[in-house]
């Protein structure tokens, strides 16, 4: 596979027919597939294919905190470990977790903590392990989305799901769901997550240039895309139980 370096980015991110390089319209999401209950040793788990991204999430808890000194006497703690596999990108990623992985782990944790009732679980921990096995832009959003599903699959009481998407600007046009090349060669990138129980934004990052008017429009188009992702999350959770009820599949956990 070719090594993608900055100098090799395409000059234009739109084709002559006005579509994006992967054939999408401005507001079109990449194909998304979600499945819960995919890892039998976890308390809850989920798998997400989002364009070329492939991400697993495994949830454990509530359980004893290791190391013990991290335990809090009045509440549970949430620990998120985002990892991108060495083979998940064109240039070999260093196996040891770097600053980017620590940052994304923290972001995902900050997005998910508000939906949990950690005060009901003093002295315990919930741990979420996220493994990105194929990466192509937007893995922090994919990770947040799939981790919320894995928490729900674990049967952990939650106020709602969380969904996330990156919107942005490429060649001066606003688009939803940036692919890897659009993320790198585009003008602006804005990952957003929403907690559905209160419809509050729990993640808003920004990289690039835009004015306040553009920012407001971005939030509108993001909300539409986030609603679609939320629906897909609900369908994937329900479909596990429909399959079990109809006896059409083996129990996955
Ligand atoms: O994945 P996300 O967009 O949330 O985070 P990013 O740091 O903006 O990375 C954008 C994309 O760059 C990733 O999804 C990967 O496809 C790629 N990347 C890479 O090729 N090598 C790395 N060491 C890190 C990221």
Image: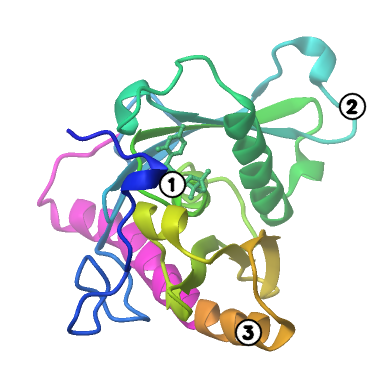
Crowding at label 2, few (<14), some or many (≥20) Cα neighbours within 10 Å?
few
Q: Which residue is mark 1?
A: 153
Confirm if mark 3 falls within 8 A of ligand 1. Answer: no
Whether 238 is drawn above or below 121: the answer is: below
Residue closer to the observer: 214 or 123: 214
The disc, 2 or 3, on the residue closer to the chain's N-terminal end is: 2
Which element carries disc 2, helix, strand or loop?
loop
Q: Which residue is mark 3?
A: 214
Of circles 3 and 1, which is in front? 3
> Toward the viewer: 187 or 119?
187
Q: Residue at x 17, y 33 (%)?
A: 1
- The residue that mark 2 highlights is 73
Quarter residue 194 falls in: bottom right
**Looking at the picture, how far across and down is residue 48, in whole percent?**
33, 49
Viewport quadrant of the C terminus: top left
Element at label 1: helix
State the image quarter where residue 101 is shown.
top right
Where disc 3 sits, the SS reads helix
Is 126 positioned to the left or the right of 130 in the image? right
């Amino acid at each position: 596979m070719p090594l993608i370096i900055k100098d090799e980015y395409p000059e234009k991110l739109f084709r002559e027919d006005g579509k994006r390089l992967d054939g999408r319209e401005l507001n079109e999401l990449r194909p998304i597939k979600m499945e819960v209950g995919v890892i039998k040793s976890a308390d809850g788990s989920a798998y997400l294919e989002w364009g070329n991204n492939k991400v697993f999430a495994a949830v454990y808890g509530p359980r004893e905190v290791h190391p013990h000194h991290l335990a809090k006497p009045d509440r549970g703690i949430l620990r998120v470990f985002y990892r991108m596999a060495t083979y998940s990108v064109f240039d070999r990623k260093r196996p040891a977790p770097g600053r980017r992985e620590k940052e994304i782990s923290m972001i995902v944790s900050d997005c998910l903590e508000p939906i949990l009732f950690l005060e009901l679980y003093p002295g315990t921990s919930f741990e979420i392990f996220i493994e990105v096995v194929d990466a192509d832009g937007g893995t922090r959003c994919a990770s947040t989305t799939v981790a919320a599903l894995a928490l729900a699959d674990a049967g952990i009481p939650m106020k709602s799901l969380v969904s996330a998407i990156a919107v942005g600007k490429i060649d001066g046009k606003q688009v939803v769901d940036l692919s890897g090349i659009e993320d790198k060669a585009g003008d602006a990138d804005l990952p957003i997550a929403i907690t559905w129980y209160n419809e509050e934004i729990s993640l808003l990052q920004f990289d690039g240039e835009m004015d306040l008017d553009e920012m407001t429009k971005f939030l509108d188009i993001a909300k539409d895309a986030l609603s679609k992702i939320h629906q897909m999350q609900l369908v994937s959770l329900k479909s596990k139980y429909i399959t079990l009820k109809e006896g059409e599949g083996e129990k996955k956990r």
